Image (spheres, rainbow, N blue to C red):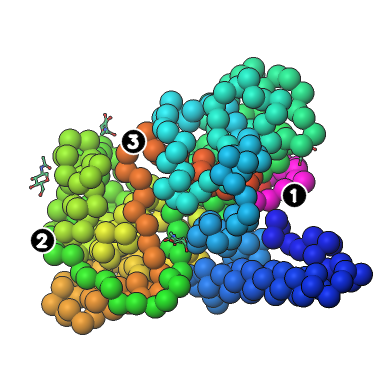
Amino acid sequence: MSSFPKAADFNMAAPTSSVLRAILKGALVLAGIIVLLSMYYRSFPSPRCHPSPKQLTKQDNSQNESVATTPSSSLPGEQQADKPVVLLWFWPESKKFDFQVCKKLNINNCRLTDDRSLYSSAHAVLIFHKAIKDDLSNLPTTPRPAFQRWIWLNMDPPSNTLKIAGIESLFNLTASFREDADIHVRWQLTAKKHMDDNFVLPEKEHLLCWIVNSSDLDTQTGEEYRYYKELIKYIKVDIFDSSSNESSRGENYFRTISSCKFFLSFENSDHKDHITETFNGPLAAGTVPIVLGPLRKNYERFVPSTSFIHVNDFPDPLALAEFLLKLDDDNEAYMKYFDWRHFYNVRRHFTEENHAFALAICQACRHIGITHEFRVVRDLYKWFFI
Ligand SMILES: *[C@@H]1O[C@H](CO)[C@@H](O)[C@H](O)[C@H]1NC(C)=O
Ligand SMILES: *[C@@H]1O[C@H](CO)[C@@H](O)[C@H](O)[C@H]1NC(C)=O
Ligand SMILES: *[C@@H]1O[C@H](CO)[C@@H](O)[C@H](O)[C@H]1NC(C)=O
Ligand SMILES: *[C@@H]1O[C@H](CO)[C@@H](O)[C@H](O)[C@H]1NC(C)=O
């Protein structure tokens, strides 16, 4: 870590005044370490079953980058030149955005670029899986500099990921939904520095809502659609059509969700850790998510157990419907679903279409800016397709 003391800070042969200075410096460094340690212990939703220590250190910086990573002495200009270069090789799905967006996430640890002429000096090359051609002809062809790390970027779950032959051992780092990926691409809660009760429940107009492409309701047969069809026999679900209703897009997205007491956060696949914005939306909007996707235990690795309702908590859709109707009449019980807000912050995810990959790309920037370890992903597919 960059804040580690240099040997010169502890020069024993120095005259008294510089011994004093050394002691002062030592105290400052110690204070820094204490701050880092306390962030280490405070930045996790679930202390009982938190991620591995390797991932904890990464999250230290998500809280407040200026505290965790920026040495106070560095000048802005000098800093920019010092930062590692991260080259985005493909724009994922042609969704271009301004890299300055990362600053909104307090991420400013690298120099992001899409300029391929910087390849030979790039410290990392971010490669979007879906854009790689079968014959690998659109990957960099010049030899990889020894210091350069290639990052595999894939936001999709295994069921939606094509195996492209020949890339299994090309990468040094992974960026995916998986909790054990090197770089996380999920919107996560962060611990508050001080407990508070600032939460005010938004005004509610609807009981239960879902934002979904309404033509899919007739044509699709996935588990989420089957569950929905059963559920509406017992409780009304207000549908906001993602393909035509403006109330479910952009600015209106959070407004719409916040007007609902409950929201269907149904994932379209059941893969470990594949928990998407459809879950972050209601958490950020002040609404209780009803989840269908991976198991409850999996969700609980990322959020407190009392922040959501899982369809598996009930034997069938009827029992869920009855429970929701009961909660609708019991405000005290309903408000318990927001208790976690005393302790955690939740951030609104980007809803702009062209920002779909911005978090992932910014997170890669942060990772490259703060870690320098040598690493090789030996068999990408063996890890990803379990
Ligand atoms: C980060 O720290 C600075 C300085 O203490 C503070 O002004 C800022 O609000 C913090 N940002 C976040 C997101 O906590
Ligand atoms: C909505 O679903 C229809 C039919 O399944 C599809 O043709 C259309 O592209 C979808 N719209 C969006 C915005 O995904
Ligand atoms: C769009 O959302 C509004 C918001 O409440 C709703 O009143 C309207 O019926 C919706 N229209 C469609 C076509 O889904
Ligand atoms: C990155 O991975 C490649 C391919 O496995 C390996 O040859 C190279 O040494 C690794 N470099 C770093 C900096 O980890």
Q: Residue 373 carries which label?
A: 1
Q: Is mark 1 within 8 Å of ligand 4?
A: yes
Rendered position, 39 above or below 205: below
Mark 2 or mark 1: which comes first in sequence?
2
The earlier-in-sequence mark between 2 and 3 is 2
Cα gap from disc 2 to disc 1, whole angstroms:
51 Å
Answer left or right for 185 relative to 339. right
Membership of 380 in magenta stretch: yes
Q: Which of marks 2 and 3 is in front?
A: 3
10 Å neighbourhood of mark 3: few (<14), some, or many (≥20)?
Answer: few
Above or below residue 127? Residue 23 is below
Q: Is the magenta stretch mostly helix, strand or loop?
A: loop
Q: Point out which mark residue 353 bears.
A: 3
Is residue 191 at all visible to an observer of this figure? Answer: yes
SS under mark 1:
loop
Q: Distance between the residues labelled 2 and 3?
A: 27 Å
Q: Which of 41 and 209 is in front in this view?
A: 41
User: Which amino acid is tagged 3?
Assistant: Glu
The amino acid sitting under disc 1 is Glu
Q: What residue type is labelled 2?
A: Glu
Badge 2: few (under 14), some or many (20 or more) residues near its Cα, within 10 Å?
few
Give the side of residue 361 with respect to residue 171, left or right: left
Give the extent of the magenta segment. Answer: 370-382
Residue at the location (43% across, 63% down)?
189
Earlier in the chain: of badge 1 and badge 3, it is: 3
Identify the residue under disc 2.
Answer: 205
Where is residue 336 shown, x and y percent of the image?
28, 78
Tell me the element at label 3: helix
Magenta span has 98? no
